[in-house]
C-alpha cells in the first residue's frame, strides 16, 4: 500500500473513532475537530452528568457559605447546567447555592457539608447522574429519594431539576391549633409514606394548614405536598410533607403540572 493511501486510511480511522465518541455522548452532531484520544473524556463527562453537558475545568478554590467572586459564579453556573438550582447567578455563596451544593454532594456520594473543596471540584468535572428510582416510570415524573433527601424532576425523560429536600421526621406528634374557628388537637406519625402518587391541587404563595404555613404547595398524597419552607435541614424534619428550599418552590409550579406521577422510595437512616 502506498504512503498516500496509508495516510488516508489512518485519517478515516481517526474520524470514525471521534464520531463514535460523539454518539456515545448522546449527540448526533458531526465529529468535533479534536484528537481521537481526547474525545472519550468529553463523552464520559456528558453521559455521567446525564445532561449532555460539555466538559468543565474547576477553579479549584476552596469555598464556603459567605464566599464571593468568580469561583463562586463558576460553581453556580456549573450547578445550574447540571440541573441543580443555585438561585441567582451572582457570585455570592448564599443559602440557595448551599442547598444546591448539598444536593450535588448527596448525588455524588460526598458528605453534605456546604464546603466546596478538591473532591467536589473533581466531581463537578465528572459528575454522576442521580440514581433512577423507577426505571420504567413515565418520561415526565418526580422521584423522591427519602434515603438521600432528594427530589428529582424528569421532563420528557431528561433531568430537569434536582433539589435538596427534607421529608417527614418519623417522630410522632400531637399539636393543638386553631382550625376552622376552633381549637383542635392533631396527632400523627410525621411520615412521608412511600408509594406511587400523582400531583393534585395546589396553592400560590403562603397557604395555611392546621400544622403550619406552606409556600406554593403542590399536593400529591392527600394533605402531603411539596412546598417551600424557611427551614430545610439536612435531616427529615417535617410533619410528612416534602420541604423544599424557597427558591426551588418558587420555580417548581412552572415546571410541574397536575396529574404528574410522583414516586416516593427509600428510608432515611439517622
Image (tube, grey):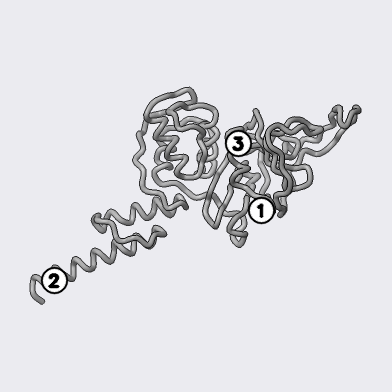
Q: Is 221 located above or below residue 270 in the figure?
A: below
Point out the image quarter for the N terminus: bottom left
Residue depicted at x 59% and y 46%: 255
- Tell me what residue is drawn at x 42 percent, y 30 percent: 72
Residue under numbered circle 1: 260
Coordinates of residue 243 in the picture (x, y in percent): 67, 37
Distance, label 3 to label 1, CA atoms, is 18 Å
User: Badges 3 and 2: C-beta atoms under 8 Å apart?
Assistant: no
C-alpha separation, residue under disc 2 versus residue under disc 1 = 57 Å
Spot occupied by residue 185 in the image (x, y as percentages of width and height): 89, 31
Q: Is residue 180 left or right of residue 211?
A: right
Q: In the rendered image, which residue does mark 2 sit on?
A: 6
Judge depth for marks 3 and 2 and give the one in front.
Answer: 3
**Mark positioned earlier in the residue sequence (2 or 1):** 2
Describe residue 96's horizontal placement relative to residue 75 as left or right. right
Q: Mark 3 — residue?
A: 250
The answer to which of marks 3 and 1 sits earlier in the sequence is: 3
Res 250 → quadrant? top right
Q: Residues within 10 Å of mark 1 (few under 14, many from 20)?
A: some
Q: Nearer the viewer, residue 97 or 174?
A: 97
Q: Position of residue 41 (x, y in %)?
A: 34, 52
The structure residue drawn at horizontal position 73% and vertical position 49%, both measured from the top left corner, is 200
Q: Is residue 128 above or below residue 231?
A: below
Amino acid at each position: 500500500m502506498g504512503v498516500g493511501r496509508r495516510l488516508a486510511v489512518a485519517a478515516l480511522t481517526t474520524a470514525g473513532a471521534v464520531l463514535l465518541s460523539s454518539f456515545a455522548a448522546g449527540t448526533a452532531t458531526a465529529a468535533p475537530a479534536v484528537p481521537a484520544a481526547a474525545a472519550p473524556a468529553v463523552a464520559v463527562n456528558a453521559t455521567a452528568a446525564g445532561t449532555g453537558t460539555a466538559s468543565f475545568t474547576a477553579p479549584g478554590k476552596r469555598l464556603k457559605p459567605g464566599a464571593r467572586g468568580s469561583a463562586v459564579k463558576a460553581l453556580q453556573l456549573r450547578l445550574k447546567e447540571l440541573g441543580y438550582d443555585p438561585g441567582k447567578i451572582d457570585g455570592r455563596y448564599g443559602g440557595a447555592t448551599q442547598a444546591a451544593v448539598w444536593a450535588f454532594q448527596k448525588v455524588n456520594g460526598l458528605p453534605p457539608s456546604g464546603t466546596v473543596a478538591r473532591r467536589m471540584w473533581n466531581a463537578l468535572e465528572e459528575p454522576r447522574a442521580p440514581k433512577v428510582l423507577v426505571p420504567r416510570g413515565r418520561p415526565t415524573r418526580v422521584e423522591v429519594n427519602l434515603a438521600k433527601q432528594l427530589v428529582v424532576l424528569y421532563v420528557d425523560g431528561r433531568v430537569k431539576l434536582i433539589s435538596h429536600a427534607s421529608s417527614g421526621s418519623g417522630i410522632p406528634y400531637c399539636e393543638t391549633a386553631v382550625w376552622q374557628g376552633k381549637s383542635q388537637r392533631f396527632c400523627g406519625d410525621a411520615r412521608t409514606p412511600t408509594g406511587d402518587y400523582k400531583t393534585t391541587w395546589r396553592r400560590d404563595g403562603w397557604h395555611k394548614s392546621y400544622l403550619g404555613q406552606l409556600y406554593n404547595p403542590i399536593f400529591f398524597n392527600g394533605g402531603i405536598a411539596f412546598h417551600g419552607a424557611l427551614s430545610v435541614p439536612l435531616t427529615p424534619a417535617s410533619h410528612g410533607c416534602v420541604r423544599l428550599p424557597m427558591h426551588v418552590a418558587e420555580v417548581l409550579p412552572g415546571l410541574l403540572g397536575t396529574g404528574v406521577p410522583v414516586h416516593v422510595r427509600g428510608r432515611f437512616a439517622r
